[in-house]
Amino acid sequence: MRIKTIIFFSFACFVVSVSYASDIHENFQNANNLILSEKFREAKKILLKIKESNPGNYQVINNLAYIEAKQGDIDKAIKILRTSISKNKDIDIIYKNLTNLYAFQANILYEEALSIKDTNKNEVILSLANDLDPQLSKSSSTQKNNILDQEKPAQNNMQIDDVENFIYEWASFWQNKNYQEYFNCYDDQYFPKNFKSRNSWMSDRKEKIQNKKNIEIKISNTKVFGFNNNVALISFTQAYNSDSFSDVVKKHTLISLVNNTLKITGEYILK
């Protein structure tokens, strides 16, 4: 009788567990559908409910950050993602979104500084987690052990040292008027928004550099913010001196791994 009772309760627990997991996945998909319909408040309620029993699930966390960003709270979205970076190698989406948020934030500040803010174009591009991890978090102690220090990015194909060295090399090419290598630091598709084409930007840059007898570029205070194995956002102070002009600016530069080569894909100046 006792054996039958144990078997019955074991089977009952299994059925409840399967049903519970099924409900979570269904609720997660319902939340996604609401997000795509821009019904963010309803979606947030569902995701927070799922998060109560699965506090370390990165898909849920990613989509909560997605909601905050789409509602305009970039700082909160960044905070959610930064506190959720773990050792799990399958959370590239977290790093990708974090990098995009930093880049978006830098671009907004840059455009505001130039008074050219266009609210119709300034929409952050983020990735939504489409499915819930079948292996949900099991214990808070495991989750705590998996949380990295907020300042430590993932170390994959692209290394932080590579990113910093790349910026110093870029500055060296500029300083030495090595046009070919300087332009090679940029992605083939890159040119600033105020130019009609890459060729027109390159011609303008080359002319301005050629007109200077001496150029000195000093890079300091480098710090890598957004980071994954393919994209990084680095901030630094740039001191420029020439025979006719000098200034000091803070820059945010987006660097991407293109065909296994580091390339600049975005530049933002913060005066």
Image (cartoon, helix red, strand yellow):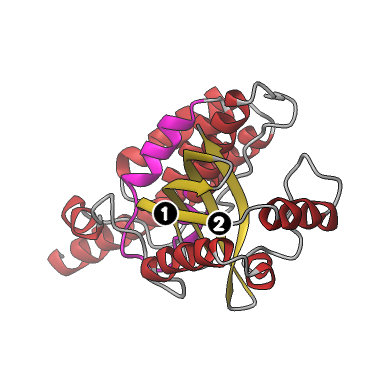
- In the figure, residue 15 lies in which quadrant? bottom left
Q: Residues within 10 Å of mark 1 (few under 14, many from 20)?
A: some
Q: Is residue 97 magenta?
A: yes
Q: Horizontal and vertical percent for residue 81?
A: 40, 44
What residue is shown at x 42% (from left), y 44% (from top)? 61
Above or below, 174 against 56 in this view is: below
Q: Nearer the viewer, residue 77 or 105?
A: 105
Residue beneath disc 2: 214
Q: Amino acid at mark 2?
A: Asn
SS at circle 2: loop
Q: Is residue 212 visible?
A: yes
In the image, the segment drawn in magenta is 73-98
Q: CA distance from mark 2 to mark 1?
A: 13 Å
What residue is shown at x 75% (from left), y 54% (from top)? 207
**Nearest-to-viewer mark from 2 and 1:** 2
The mark found on residue 17 in the picture is none
